[in-house]
Amino acid sequence: MMSSMNSDWVDVQILSSLDAGEVLGLLDDPSVQGGWQDGEMVHLYWPSHTWSPDHLAKLSQVLRQLDGTCEPVINVRTLPNQDWNQVWAESVEPLWIGRYLLIRPSWQTVEERPGQIEIILDPKQAFGTGHHATTRMLLEWLEEDIHGGEAVLDVGTGSGLLAMAALRFGAFYAVGIDHDPVAIECAREYAELNRFGAEFVLQCGELSELRKGPSFNLVLANLDRETLLQLADRLAEYVHGTLLVSGILLDQQEEIAAAFAAVGLYPGRRRELDGWVAMEFLPVQSCEGE
């Protein structure tokens, strides 16, 4: 939830299936005070006194960069301050992923299921609420792949959701790293809200700056094509078991597979959802059964 809500708000509505977190990340605008995704509509919010045509121009540029197929459809409206809490509270529904994982905002309750694993996320200026296909596919894989005692590295951690889910499923240690200080600040708040302690380490910086720690059984990278290509060799240095990547469009998977093959990682399983692909990569010795 946002604070200091003493003015009207500008609600920017984008007709798009893009992930709100991806848009926020590329926009890199500290005056944006929140964002959420409602099906085929992305909402971003600015305090009205900070909004200007320059923000609209930059947003249009970012949207064309993410999806250059057509001119983005954007609607801008003013939202009175007195309506804000109600709109925000109604914006995000609890989400079940797989058999056991529930992701919900703190102000909503859900009837408990047997074996339920819960993570509380109050949407704000961070990434990965679990609603986007790229995040959902990795969360489903984590439910299958975490058997207990794993050390997990989450590269581009955003909200920290993937790392927190891995810990909930039984991993003993997780590190989340992101170059965005706003994302790390939000992730730390989520970690505290969900009562994680020393088993969850968050670091702001580049992967090359990661502090040395234990070998990682599982590396997660929910990133975009360009970043995955740039980090392929660096990611390979940390893979001592399995690498799971997401954020790949259907027509990008061959290029991604070739880039990781060049650094000694070869594709295993894959998932596909809503035009997005998640891929598993293994070191060459794993493919040979060693």
Image (spheres, rainbow, N blue to C red):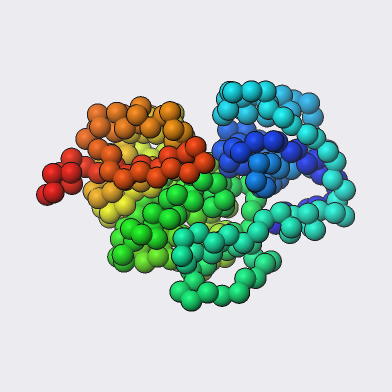
Write down the quadrant of residue 228 in the picture.
Answer: top left
User: Which residue is rendered at x = 43% and y = 28% of the image?
Assistant: 251
Side of 6 where 261 appears, left or right:
left
Q: Which one is in front, 269 or 153?
A: 269
Write down the quadrant of residue 59 in the picture.
Answer: top right
Q: Which one is in front, 150 or 31?
A: 150
Is residue 74 visible to the viewer in this orientation of the structure?
yes
The picture places residue 261, in percent across and down from the top left corner, at 25, 32
User: Which residue is rendered at x = 48% and y = 44% of the image?
Assistant: 273
- Figure check: 49 above or below 87: above
Side of 230 where 181 appears, left or right:
right
Query: How many labels sit on residues?
Result: 0
The picture places residue 152, in percent across and down from the top left corner, at 35, 55
Quadrant in which the N terminus is drawn:
bottom right
Is residue 183 visible to the viewer in this orientation of the structure?
no
User: Which residue is rendered at x = 57% and y = 51% of the image?
Assistant: 131
- Figure check: 27 above or below 244: above
User: Which residue is rendered at x = 67% and y = 67% of the image?
Assistant: 108
The picture places residue 263, in percent across and down from the top left corner, at 24, 32
The picture places residue 146, in percent across and down from the top left corner, at 34, 61
